[in-house]
Amino acid sequence: MNPAVVVVHGGGASNISKDRKERVRQGIVKAATVGYNILKEGGSAVDAVEGAVTVLEDDPEFNAGCGSVLNENGEVEMDASIMNGKDLSAGAVSAVRCVANPIKVARLVMEKTPHCFLTDQGAAKFAAASGIPTIPGEQLVTERNKKRLENEKLQKSDYQKNLGTVGAVAVDCRGNVAYATSTGGIVNKMLGRVGDTPCIGSGGYADNDIGAVSTTGHGESILKVNLARLTLFHMEQGKTLEEAADASLGYMKSKVKGVGGVILVNKAGDWAVKWTSTSMPWGAAKDGKLYSGIDLGDTSITDLP
């Protein structure tokens, strides 16, 4: 039996205000706990990452699902992807609107179509045909994100503010690994802009023989270096999880001046979280213990209920 492990992240961030920190931490803890419970009940790694990411998509504190940032037209367009390390099956969607949980649509693409990736109207049509409820686009728009868009339009700010993604990686008792990543993208993005999140190898990757990774950060930078697959490449070369994460994040920073973060697991149940952004909310559950943090050097450990 492999040790069940789930790790989640709530996106790299420049800094999280004091009043939001507790809500963010609670959201992360809930997502990690939900994912871990799925594994404890015999669920697969894919079930666990989908479950954990769904919790974060439903939480308005995070830039995914309800809480997604707005594009230049003030609308929500979301991206998501999921991958099963057992057979490298993968599913992704981009520029989807009017659904609460893009990660569920991505999983359906993986399991119910011969394709890996559906976009925009095709993804919407497929989601509706698969029984995913359509919701009014306004339902995903929060007041906080309306203000963010206004501020962004007034003054061109540094992209460090726009690093939100949510993600999860897991290994189940059968030794299968999986990842899931979901996002609303970046504030004031051009209509139809797609970042790293739905791109297999950038937003995440899972292969039982190596491990699973979910990334967060500046999407264009992550795409340019294929951050997820690059991290796993370093693991294939014999680096530890921490060394692999440091190497790939360091490369992205030196090569394209991009910052971000990664969470990763391998089938032995080792896990790591690393980031070069100012902070990255994260949580990890293993052996009945829950680890979580937001800033560097701030890790709390509690017993899982």
Image (cartoon, rainbow, N blue to C red):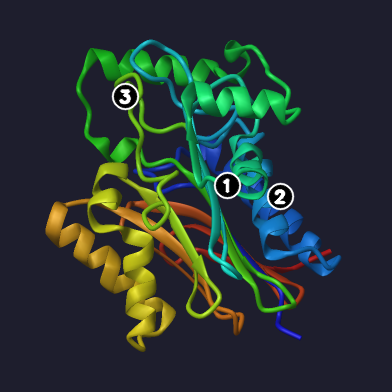
Circles 3 and 1, Cβ within 8 Å, touching? The answer is no
Amino acid at circle 3 = Lys
The residue depicted at 35 percent of the width and 36 percent of the height is 162
Circles 1 and 2, Cβ within 8 Å, touching? The answer is no
Q: Which residue is mark 1?
A: 114
Local secondary structure at mark 2: helix
Using residue 170 as the reference point, say whether residue 289 is left or right of it. Answer: right
Circles 2 and 3, Cβ within 8 Å, touching? The answer is no
Amino acid at circle 2 = Gly
- Rendered-image quadrant of the N terminus: bottom right
How far apart are the two marked residues, 3 and 1, measured between alpha carbons? Answer: 30 Å
Q: Which residue is mark 2?
A: 51
Local secondary structure at mark 3: loop
Q: Which residue is mark 3?
A: 189
- Rendered-image quadrant of the C terminus: bottom right
Q: Earlier in the sequence, mark 2 or mark 3?
A: 2
**Residue 211 coordinates in the image, percent (x, y):** 51, 74
Q: Earlier in the sequence, mark 1 or mark 2?
A: 2
Q: Nearer the viewer, residue 252 or 297?
A: 252
